[in-house]
Image (cartoon, helix red, strand yellow):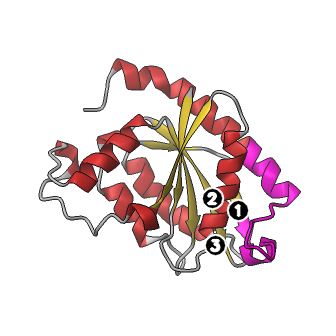
Amino acid sequence: MTRVMVIVGSVRPGRIGRPIADWVTSDLLGVDGRDVDFVDLAELALPFMDEPNHPLLRQYTKPHTLAWSERVEAADAFVFVTPEYNHSFSPALKNALDFLSHEWRRKPVTFVSYGGASAGTRGVIALKPAVVALGLVPTLTNVEINFPGSFLSDDGEFQASDTHRSRLQLALAELVALAEALRPLRELAPAR
């Protein structure tokens, strides 16, 4: 069983990331052998980094950090549903990443980005050095959604195009394959 964590990377009221993440999650839930942990950063409500010790030490003192560490540790792979803010990434997502260190290592990540004409790609480009520094392994395939508001139904549900669906299938297949390929490295030398 591959445990995939889907993270809604925006906490902004009225964000479109939640319906997009719901679409990604429903797609993941339809496949045997995959378990999904859905994380909405707005609901998780991590404060701005408030741990007294560096995350490398894993000497967490706050209940919210201990709970976050446990969830991330249990995941085999990640899907970041992320907007582009001012040619960069969401500060809420960066904060969630920075709370931890070892828990991210040797695990794959794929991005479902969204934005205007750029489809969020500049945000992903800016985010990649941070995720690689944490030891995450990005997939080559990502999903990029231009003008995502045009894909919302009247009831606010994201209506993926055929291109979005096919890209998501490719990205998820690569994500799961990487999770399995990296599993022996995580088990052989736990990053503790």
Q: CA distance from mark 2 to mark 3?
A: 9 Å
User: Counting residues from the N terminus, which is met first, the one under dot 2 or under dot 3?
Assistant: 3
Crowd around label 2: few <14 · some 14–19 · many ≥20 (10 Å): many
**Which of label 1 and label 3 is nearer to you?**
3
Q: Is residue 130 above or below residue 73?
A: below
Residue 47, magenta (yes or no)? no
Residue at x-position 37% and y-position 38%: 73
User: Counting residues from the N terminus, which is met first, the one under dot 2 or under dot 1?
Assistant: 2
The image position of residue 164, as x and y in percent, is 79, 57
Residue 150, magenta (yes or no)? yes
In the rendered image, the quadrant that contains the C terminus is top left
Residue type at mark 2: give it.
Ala
Residue type at mark 3: give it.
Ile
The image position of residue 154, as x and y in percent, is 80, 77
Q: Are marks 2 and 3 in contact (CB under 8 Å)?
A: no
User: Counting residues from the N terminus, which is met first, the one under dot 1 or under dot 3?
Assistant: 3
Residue designated by label 2: 21
Mark number, residue 144: 1
Instruction: Give the structural element (helix, strand or loop) at label 1.
Output: strand
Q: Which region shows up in magenta?
A: 144-169
**Which of label 2 and label 1 is nearer to you?**
2
Mark number, residue 120: none
Mark number, residue 16: 3
Determine whether, in the image, residue 131 is placed left or right of residue 59: right
Q: CA distance from mark 1 to mark 3?
A: 14 Å
Q: CA distance from mark 2 to mark 1?
A: 13 Å
The image position of residue 95, as x and y in percent, is 35, 64
Crowd around label 1: few <14 · some 14–19 · many ≥20 (10 Å): many
The image position of residue 106, as x and y in percent, is 43, 35
